[in-house]
Image (cartoon, coloured by chain):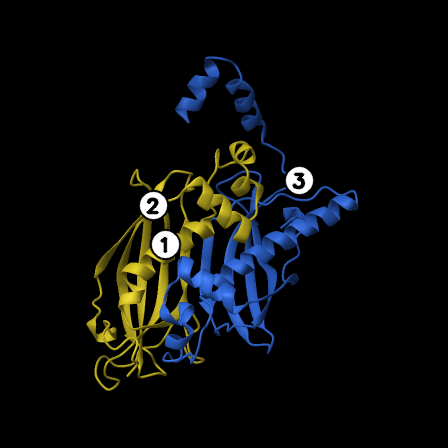
Chain colours: A yellow, B blue
C-alpha cells in the first residue's frame, strides 16, 4: 500500500459517468504574456499590437496555456484526490475558440471509461473527457485524457481488457 | 513549417534540439500546473512506483512546443538570409494523439524531432493546407519519452483565388453593398 495515496479514492471507487465540476480561472494579460515567454513565444501571444493584426483579433492565450490551466483545475479537484499513478497521455485535443485576455474559463471532467491494466494488476486506467468553456458558455477546448489509478485489490474487479490506444507495457510516465 | 505547403517533404525528420530538465524546473512546473505528489515533492515521490521525482508529462510536451517555435523561427531567419521568402504557418486546430512513454527525471536530456507525415489542401479554408505532424521526444538513453500526432495549417504559395471570390471581395469594398454582402454570409 502506498502511504501517500492510502486514504484517497482508488480505481474501484470511480464510476463511469461521474462528472466533476473543476471550477474556473480568470486568464489575465500578465498570465498570457508570462506563459508565452516561457513556452509559446509567438508575436500574437506576446504583443498586443501584433495580436490585433493577427487572425485572433486581440491578445489570446496559447492553446497550450488553456490546456495547462485546465490540467491545474483537474489536478486540484480530481487527480490529487484519487490514487493517481501518472498520466498515459491524451487524444482528440481540439482548440475550438481562442481564449482572450480577461476571459474566465471553466471546466468539467466526466469519467468516460474505466478498465483494468492488462499487465499490472495494481493499476486501472481512467479515461476522462474534459470540456472547457468561456464565460459566455462557448466551448473553447475539449480532449480525452487517460490516467493510471492504483487499485485497492488486484484480484477483484473486471477482467482484463485490451488496452487501445494506450499501452502500459513499459509502465506509465507522467 | 516555415516552408511553403508545396515545398514540404513527407517523412523528412526536422531536428528541434534538446532540453535538460533540472529539478528546480520540474518542481516549479508541477507547482504551477500539475501539483501531484510525484511532480512536487521528492520525499513523497519515493512512495510512488516511479521511485522518485518525475517531470509532468505536460511539462515535457510544452517544452517540445517551445523547441518547435524556436527551431522554426531560426529556420525562417536562415531562409531570409538566403534571400528566400519563408512560408506561413497558421494556428493549430488540435492534437490527435499524445502518448507518454517513459518518465523524465531531474537531469534527463530530451531531444525532439518533428516529421511531417502527411499533407493535403484544406477543404474548409481556401488557400491553406493541412499538415499532419509527428513529434517524437527521446531521452539521453535513446528511450522514447513521448510520441505526438499534431495537426497544423500551412499557407499555399501557388494558390490563385478563384474568380468568383475575387469578384465578391471587390464587391464587399463598395460601401453599403459590402455591408449587405458580409451580413448575408
Residue at x-position 42% and y-position 39%: A100
Whether labels 3 and 2 belong to a single chain: the reply is no
Chain for mark 1?
A
Q: Which mark is residue B28?
A: none
Secondary element under disc 3, as helix, strand or loop, is loop
Look at the numbered discs 2 and 1 and tell me whether their residues touch, using CB distance below 8 Å. Answer: yes
Which quadrant does the C terminus of chain B fall into? top left
Query: Residue B81 location in percent, x, y?
Result: 78, 45
Q: Position of residue B35 (x, y in %)?
A: 37, 63
Between residues B127 and B73, which one lies in front from this camera angle? Answer: B73
Discs 2 and 1 share one subunit: yes
Count neighbours of disc 3 (C-alpha within 10 A) and say few if under 14, some if 14 to 19, many if 20 or more: few
Q: Name the front one of labels 3 and 2.
A: 2
Residue that carries the numbered disc 2 in the rendered image = A105
Chain letter of the residue beneath label 2 in the structure image? A
Which residue is labeled 3 in the image? B158
Please determine whether, in this image, residue A59 is positioned above or below residue B3.
above
Measured in 3D between alpha carbons, the distance from the residue under mark 3 to the one under mark 2, in whole angstroms, is 40 Å
Secondary structure of the residue carrying numbered label 2: strand
B30 with respect to B5 (left or right): left
Is residue A80 visible to the viewer in this orientation of the structure?
A: yes
Mark 1 surroundings: few (<14), some (14-19) or many (≥20) residues within 10 A? many
| Near-viewer residue (A74 or A53) | A74
Badge 2: how crowded within 10 Å, few (<14), some, or many (20+)? many
Q: Secondary structure beneath disc 1?
A: helix
The residue that appears at 59% across and 56% down in the rendered structure is: B68
Contact between marks 3 and 2 (CB within 8 A): the answer is: no
Amino acid at each position: 500500500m502506498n502511504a501517500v495515496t492510502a486514504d484517497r479514492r482508488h480505481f474501484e471507487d470511480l464510476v463511469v459517468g461521474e462528472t466533476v465540476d473543476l471550477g474556473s480561472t480568470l486568464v489575465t494579460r500578465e498570465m498570457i504574456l508570462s506563459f508565452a515567454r516561457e513556452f509559446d513565444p509567438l508575436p500574437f501571444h506576446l504583443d498586443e499590437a501584433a495580436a490585433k493584426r493577427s487572425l485572433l483579433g486581440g491578445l489570446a492565450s496559447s492553446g497550450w496555456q488553456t490546456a495547462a490551466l485546465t490540467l491545474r483545475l483537474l489536478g486540484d479537484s480530481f487527480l490529487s484526490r484519487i490514487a493517481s499513478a501518472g498520466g498515459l497521455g491524451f487524444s482528440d485535443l481540439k482548440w475550438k475558440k481562442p481564449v482572450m485576455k480577461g476571459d474566465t474559463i471553466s471546466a468539467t471532467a466526466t469519467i468516460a471509461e474505466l478498465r483494468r491494466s492488462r499487465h499490472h494488476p495494481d493499476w486501472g486506467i481512467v479515461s476522462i473527457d474534459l470540456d472547457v468553456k468561456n464565460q459566455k458558455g462557448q466551448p473553447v477546448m475539449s480532449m480525452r485524457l487517460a490516467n493510471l489509478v492504483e487499485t485497492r485489490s488486484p484480484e477483484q474487479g473486471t477482467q482484463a481488457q485490451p488496452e487501445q490506444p494506450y499501452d502500459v507495457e513499459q509502465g506509465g510516465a507522467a | 513549417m516555415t516552408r511553403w505547403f508545396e515545398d514540404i517533404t513527407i517523412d523528412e525528420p526536422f531536428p528541434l534540439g534538446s532540453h535538460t530538465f533540472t529539478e528546480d524546473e520540474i518542481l516549479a512546473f508541477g507547482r504551477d500546473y500539475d501539483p501531484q505528489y510525484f511532480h512536487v515533492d521528492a520525499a513523497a515521490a519515493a512512495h510512488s512506483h516511479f521511485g522518485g521525482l518525475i517531470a509532468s508529462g505536460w511539462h515535457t510536451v510544452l517544452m517540445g512546443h517551445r523547441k518547435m517555435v524556436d527551431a522554426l523561427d531560426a529556420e525562417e531567419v536562415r531562409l531570409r538570409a538566403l534571400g528566400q521568402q519563408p512560408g506561413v504557418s497558421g494556428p493549430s486546430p488540435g492534437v490527435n494523439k499524445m502518448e507518454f512513454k517513459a518518465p523524465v527525471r531531474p537531469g534527463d536530456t530530451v531531444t525532439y524531432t518533428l516529421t511531417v507525415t502527411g499533407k493535403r489542401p484544406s477543404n474548409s479554408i481556401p488557400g491553406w493546407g493541412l499538415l499532419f505532424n509527428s513529434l517524437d521526444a527521446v531521452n539521453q538513453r535513446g528511450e522514447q519519452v513521448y510520441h505526438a500526432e499534431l495537426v497544423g495549417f500551412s499557407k499555399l504559395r501557388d494558390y490563385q483565388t478563384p474568380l468568383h471570390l475575387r469578384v465578391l471581395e471587390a464587391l464587399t469594398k463598395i460601401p453599403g453593398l459590402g455591408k449587405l454582402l458580409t451580413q448575408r454570409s
